[in-house]
Structures are given as C-alpha cells and as structure tokens.
Image (spheres, rainbow, N blue to C red):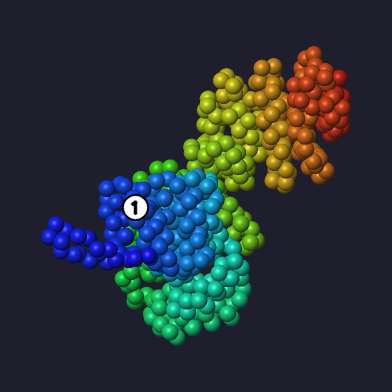
Amino acid sequence: MNRNKKVVGENRNIISMHLDANFFYERALRSLDRFHYDKALKYFQRAVDYEPSNPINYCNIAGVLSEIGKYGESNHILQKVIDEIDPSMTECHFYMANNFANMEFFEDAERELIQYLQKDEEGQYLEEAEEMIEYLELELERPTSITKVKARAGVYEHIHARELLEKGQYADAIQLLQTITKENPDFLAARNNLALAYYYVGFKKEGKQAIEEVLVEEPGNLHALCNLALFYHYEGETSALHALLQTLKNIDPFYQEHTFKMATTMGILKEHRIALRHFSRLIREGEAKKDTCVYHFAAIAACNIAKYDVAKKYWEMYKAMDEQSSIPQYFLELLNIIKQEPLKSSLTYSFYHSVEEQMAAWEHQASERGVAIEPQLLKAFFYWALQHGNYAAKLKSIQAMESYADEQVAMAMRQFLLLPDEDDYLKQIAMFVLRSMGMNEAFHVMISGQKINVEAERVPAMPSPELIYADLNWEEVAQLAITKTAKYFNVIEQHDMITLWINFLSKSSRTTPKLNKIEAWAAAIEYLTAKMYNRSVTYHDVALRYSTSISTVSKRVKQIDEICEVKRKMKSMTYSWMMT
C-alpha cells in the first residue's frame, strides 16, 4: 500500500501528506465529535491496519461499538485484546463489565469486574468500579464476591478481614491477614489485627510475637501499644500493664482512628474517666461525631463512673440522631434503674443494633461466667418492651419478671392488663406471673375489649422455665387455639382453655411430650374445653377446623386427659384442676 499521496493544487504546488495511524486516529476523533460513528469506525479500523499490534486502536473500535449499542461485538474485540494483543490491558475487563451490564448480563458483568479489580495495579477506574459494584448488588440482590482489589495493595482485603473478625470468623480472618502481611510486609494495621486474631483463637504466643514485631519496626505504633496493653490485661501481667498504662494515659492522639482505639482500650481496661475524655473529644471534633456508636460508648463510660446526667445527655443525642434505633430507648430505661440500684459490674463497651441482640449477648456472657444476669438489665428490658417491643420481646420480658419482681414491676404489669390494644395471650401470661409473685387478689383485665375481673385462684402457674425454653411450640399451640375459637368461645371459656393447656404442661414437665403437629394439640384443648362447658362438639368438628386427622386429635385428647383428668372431674362437676 502506498502510504504517501500527492495532492495537486491550483498553483500545481505539491503538498505531501503522511498517512499513518495517528492521521486516521485524528480523523476518527473529529468524526466522533460530530457523532459520525460510522466514519469513526472506519478511521479507527484504518489505524489498526497501520498498527495491528497496538491495543489502543482495538479498544477505540470497541468503544465506538459500545457507543452505538453493539455491546457483543465490542466485547469480542476486547477479549481479542486480552487473549492475543496485550494481556496487561486489564482495563478491558472493566470495559467488558460495562457492556455486559448494559446487556443486563449481570453475572457476566460481575465476573469481568472482579477480574479488573484483582488484576489492575493502577486503579484508573476504581471509583467507577465501586459504583458498579453497588449497582450489581442491587440487580443481583446479593453482595458481590469480590475479595481482592490489587490497586489498593491489601486495603480492601484488610477491610474484609476486619469484618470477619467482627463476625467471629477468626480462622478465615487469620488466613486472609497472613496473606495480606506476606504480600505487604509494611501494612502494619493488618499485622496488628493478625495479632488480635491470634489471641482470639488462643494462639497467645503468636499474638504477642506479632505485636512485638510491629513495635520493633515502629516503637510508637499506637494500635500495637493498645493491643499489648489488652494482652497484659487478659493475661494478668499487672506490673507490665501498669507501666504501659502510665505511658498511654499521657497520650492524646491526633488522628480520630487512633483516638477511638485509645478510648475503647481505656474502657476495656476500666479506665472509664480517660475513655470518656477521648470519646468526648471524638464527639466534639471531626467526622466521628456522626457515628452513633461513639455517643453510645461515651454514655457507657459516663454511666460507669456514675456521671448519670452526662450519660443521659449522650444517649438522648444518640436517640435524636437515629430515631428508629431501640438501643438508646432501652439504655435510658436502664439508667433510671441504675440510679436507684447500681450494677455490681461495669457496663461493657459493646454496640448492637437492637435490644434483643444486646440482651442475648449479656445472657451469653452471664452463662459463660456461670452467674445470673443482673436483674437491673432484665427490669429495663421489661419496661422497654412494654412500651416499644414487639410481641416476642414483650412475651420474653414478662416471663423474665417471675424471678425479679417488685412493687413497680407489679404495678406496670397490672397497668398492662388494662391496655385495650395489647394481645390477650400476653395478658394471660402476665396474670400467671403476677400470681407467681404472690398476688392473691382479683385481677382487673381487659380481654377482647371487655373489662373483667379474674380471681387469682383461676390463674395457674406458668410452665417451668426449662419447658418454655426447651420447646417454644407450647406458645404456638395456645395462640392457634385462641385464634380458632375467637368466634365460638367467650373470654372466660378461652381463659379456661389456656389454663387447661398450661396446667397440662406444668404437670407433665418431667415427661414433656414433643409438641409437633401443633394443630392437633390446639384442637385437643378446644375439644376438652367445649366438653367442659357442655358444648356440642365432635372430633370430626375440631379436626376439620384445624386441618388435622381425627385419630391424632383423639390421641392428644387422651394424653391431656390422662394428666389433668378432665373427664372424671367433669362428671363430678368440680373444676379443682384449675387450681395448682
């Protein structure tokens, strides 16, 4: 091909034009500016003809094809670049991910995006890739499976490792952190977290060694010093901890991340005044004041040194920042109780997103120590649940008060019985608890919109706690029976039906039956209650209503009757079985 042409002007002056890849590249750009995509494609193709080994020319063609909606053809060329022209052109994976996303092939887009993030060292499209991750997660309705971002030199993996630590997946965290520290020896933050992970799984020697290695390279590394202090604390190395504490107490970190680390470390070491000082600094300065957990920890620190007004202020600020969170509401209830009944131990510096999670954590900690959970925590849960909790929280909190009752709890429970919008079954449980607290007078209660008086002797004791927590289906049986009999039984009949059920469970607690097929159990207690009140009912009637078999209902009726002797007592017209 002749690459030089001669152009003859009017004056027959000859101008030489040098045709090369750059010439056609410039022509292609001019065509793109005018939205002449067909011409741009032809010019870019001519550039490829001149420089067939230049991957940029191919990418330009792929770009134009993508612009005009030919995503499949664009990807074919980009794949050719990766496979044949220049495998180091990792950005081609990003371009292909865009094309697949435009074709709504989201799985393929995710695959190419992961390839880009794991291979590209420059990170030219890192921000755009992160935006695409969010988009793909919405479309796929799940998190993307990205585990490594090469351009961030271990930072992304370190974030993932920290998440694994927070979830308690220590073995996976250790494996990932070992890889990060091997590939990036200067990544001291990863080495600090590796030391913590070692400690969590009991590799104390390796954990301490990892901390000391960080301090050899950077003697003033604050995270390592704090971790070493925690190590001394948990290992009971009092003298070493005392010496290190004197150093840490005199440090006022400049960076917020360091300040937060110092504050939480001081809190764990029971240096609550210093912890409060650092948390207060974080609230006054910088971005940390937008984080609700900082307000929560500041309130915890204040509460632990009996600065209750300060604690109240921070929990109220937390509540104002996040009106949907249940945590500040619960702790404000707890604060009112602690003022009158101080806790034996300090509140821990932990942050949960719901009261239920917080209570479960405290129960687990108490169980591990072989002690009972402090009653103040349960009473606060009770007061909070009655006002703000869901059905499950109310049920659990009412049941818990059987062992931790006082006059204020009893008064709150009596008021609960009169609330017209509360669940009738919850009120039944509340009456059981009040009786177990020694309340012998009649209860005034609003049941199904009617205010009635229930004599105390008609309220049986609750099933044993062992039974309640061993098989929660007992409650489902009661709820189902109440729902199914709403149109047939009056409030007294429903009350006696649940009384029969609780009585059966209490008396059979040593040989508690498995409460599978809850429909049959519910049908059985309805059947027996109907017979007690001389209602016309057959096994067929209740089996049909509860979608179960006649034979199964019959078996359950026989089991209940063997324990409670309902039929025998019906004959003598004595209902003494109600009194336990």
Image vertical order of residue 491 relative to residue 257, above or below: above
Image vertical order of residue 299 relative to residue 151, above or below: above
- Horizontal side of 453 relative to 338 (left or right) equals right
The residue under the point 84% across, 29% down is 552
Q: Nearer the viewer, residue 72 or 377?
A: 72
Q: Nearer the viewer, residue 550 or 334?
A: 550
Which residue in the rendered view is the most extreme toward the front?
12
Which residue in the rendered view is the most extreme toward the left?
11
- Horizontal side of 539 relative to 200 (left or right) equals right
The residue under the point 51% across, 73% down is 180
Residue 577 lies in quadrant: top right
Judge the density around disc 1: few (<14), some (14-19), many (≥20) Cα neighbours within 10 Å: many
- Horizontal side of 102 relative to 145 (left or right) equals left
Visible in this render: residue 301? no
Q: Secondary structure at mark 1?
A: helix
Residue 549 lies in quadrant: top right
Which residue in the protein does label 1 denote? 40
Q: Give the percent coordinates (x, y) of residue 138.
A: 48, 46
Q: Nearer the viewer, residue 336 or 55?
A: 55
Q: Give the percent coordinates (x, y) of residue 75.
A: 48, 54
Q: Quadrant of the N terminus?
A: bottom left
How many marks are shown on the rendered structure? 1
Q: Give the percent coordinates (x, y) of residue 518.
A: 75, 33
The residue under the point 45% across, 75% down is 187
Q: Amino acid at mark 1?
A: Ala
Visible in this render: residue 504? yes
The residue under the point 46% across, 49% down is 71
Q: Quadrant of the C terminus?
A: top right
Q: Give the percent coordinates (x, y) of residue 192.
A: 48, 74
